[in-house]
Image (cartoon, rainbow, N blue to C red):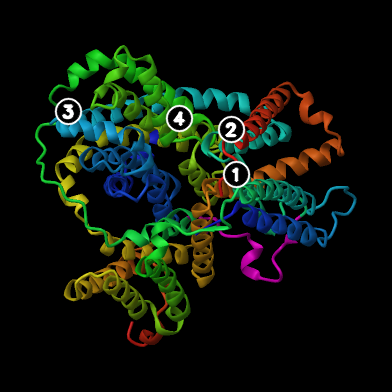
Amino acid sequence: MDVILTALGLVFQADVLLTILLSSMFGIFVGAMPGLTATMATALLVPVTFFMPPVQALSAIVSATTMAIFAGDIPGTLLRIPGTPASAAYADESYMMAKKGETELNLGVNLVFSVLGGLVGVAALIFMAPSLAELAINFSSYEYFWLALLGLTCAILIATEDALKGFIALLLGLAIGTIGIDPAAGVPRFTYGNVDLLSGVSFIPVMIGVFAVSELLRNAPTINNAAHTFAQSIGNIFTGIADVFRRYWVNFLRGSILGTVIGALPGAGADIAAWVSYAVSKRASKEPEKFGTGHIEGIVDATSANNSALGGAWIPALVFGIPGDSITAIVIGVLYMKNMNPGPSVFLQNPQFIYAVFIVFIIANLLMLPIGWVAIKSAKRILSVPRNVLSPIILMFCIVGSFAITNSDYAILIMLIGGVVGWILEENGFPVAPIILGLVLGEMLEQTFMTSMIKSDGSILPFVSRPIAGILAALTLVVWVGMAWRMITDRKALPGAA
Amino acid sequence: MRVNDAVSGLVFAALGGALIQQASRLPGFPGQKYGPDLFPKILGIGLILCGVGLIVRGAKALTAGAPLLVHQEWMKETRAVLNVFAFIGAIVFYLVLSEPIGFIPVAFAVFLGLFLWFKVSPPRAVVVAVLATAGFHWFFGSLFRIPLPRGVLTTIL
């Protein structure tokens, strides 16, 4: 109880509350702008959070991402362009509803069920994380090695269409992570006498490059396409929501739970949660023929799922230091910078921070109702911001944000390389999120691997002889076999498209 | 621009080889069998294996008649290609000139140049460039106390 009071004290401070409000508005804007994603919102926020105390920094990220995932629904409904990938699964369905004259009902459902779904995800986080942490406190380097390996493997298996290319991206991230002082022996590695590289390739500039600059480059060719306009005015969005809830509360629960579980799986986030729950909804529906014609049922599932996935993704991130999606991969990087190394010990040593995160999550989800309402009402103005004015401003944000981390041009150079390489890789079908996962988890993977190897004197047996380590090893093997099988079947289906 | 998988496979396999070669020059860990070279070497092997996988896949596609290089639609438009290079050029421009000339003039030039290139009307471009430069200087320079390069304005600021 004391801890919760301390946590409340940490959150209910003017500067933290102001941060939550401003980040929420920022998140709504970024989420609603097509082409700008929740991950990009996080990437752009991190340099700013760098100068904040831990709770304030985490509040900024939690509130911005919560809002961004909802706000992505707005242009999906109004323009048929999802604002973030998490809304892509049902953008068509929403747009069909809008064409039938049900814009208000659609946006109302999106808003209310995003809030409710988000709260389910948070509830799962609050109830599961501490008990998992108690289990994890007994883990040794063997368990952590398998967890990190399993997490990285799942990230590739679930989150990428092309496992081989996902693997390469991951190995690339891990390889970038080996630059700097090595974690076991303290030998400088691949630094070639460069002082900047001694502390490793700075994580934030790489992330800004890979997630934000590459996005700017990808959108650059179409930057002069006309700004999106629509003439509709939006009435009362809350009419009829109660009816939808009475009729589809099962869908809401199913979507939220599915979203939380998918979010908690390493590597799969809100976008996959939305796709899967929409598909499940269609399969389980009594009237699947209505799907795709502007039917609300699947939207209830999917819009609850993508917001609940956010909370779910924090479970493995806080308990094991293994990110549930690319946003929490960034969060883990931030936690390390704040000297709050994620893992079960945080729950023992600094439980007030964990509880503060829980409280901020609840506040952000509740705050979504009024802020989301304002955003829907002012959608016309938000969506008319011209991209040719916005993009150069985002670029400068990337440059100055990177510079702020090291106060030197070195970070800008890293950002530039990250942006160009990330852009080229994505153009060629390589996913970029595994690069960041590899960079974030690389040190943990290597450290636990080296410690385990030195402890076991090179023998493989101790890696699997402890019960939990054995189970994790078996799980990892199952996933690997599944992945190999998929690679083989993929190759038969698609004979090597370039 | 999409290259055939065989080309990217070759690049990554070569990268894996280079990683192993460079790692083998690292000093050992006295008294231990496993040194700082072990992990990078494993990664190098992984890169080579995956690279070979891509080469095999790309080679199959090539023999099936797929081209070595595919140009996307947007690459046929010079303006679209130059848009991409405008962003890259802006970063390089800032990187080279911000230190000697200073944040304020260079940021203003980056904004104005990009706005005009992206066809923002000139009066609007100037106004937004001035406001954005001032805004960034206030937010990062004053609020967060980032030492943005002063350059030629050192004596004035």
| Residue designated by label 1 | A496
Asked if residue A181 can be seen in this view, the reply is no
Cα gap from disc 2 to disc 1, whole angstroms? 44 Å
- Up-down relation of residue B141 to residue A335 (above or below): below
Q: How crowded is mark 2: few (under 14 residues within 10 Å), some or many (20 or more)?
A: many
The residue type indicated by label 3 comes to: Leu
- Residue A496 among those drawn in magenta: no
Q: How crowded is mark 3: few (under 14 residues within 10 Å), some or many (20 or more)?
A: many
Residue at the (46%, 57%) spot, across then down? A208
The residue type indicated by label 1 comes to: Gly
Near-viewer residue (A403 or B86): B86
Cα gap from disc 3 to disc 2, whole angstroms? 43 Å
| Residue designated by label 3 | A105
Give the mark toward the camera: 4 or 3.
3
Give the mark toward the camera: 3 or 2.
3
Near-viewer residue (A357 or A488): A488
Is mark 3 in CB contact (under 8 Å) with mark 1?
Answer: no
| Residue designated by label 4 | A312
Displayed quadrant of residue A75: top left
The residue type indicated by label 2 comes to: Pro
Q: Which chain carries label 2?
A: A
Residue found at the far right of this picture: B31
Cα gap from disc 1 to disc 4, whole angstroms? 36 Å
Cα gap from disc 3 to disc 1, whole angstroms? 45 Å
Q: Start and end of the magenta stretch? A: A186-207
| Residue designated by label 2 | A344
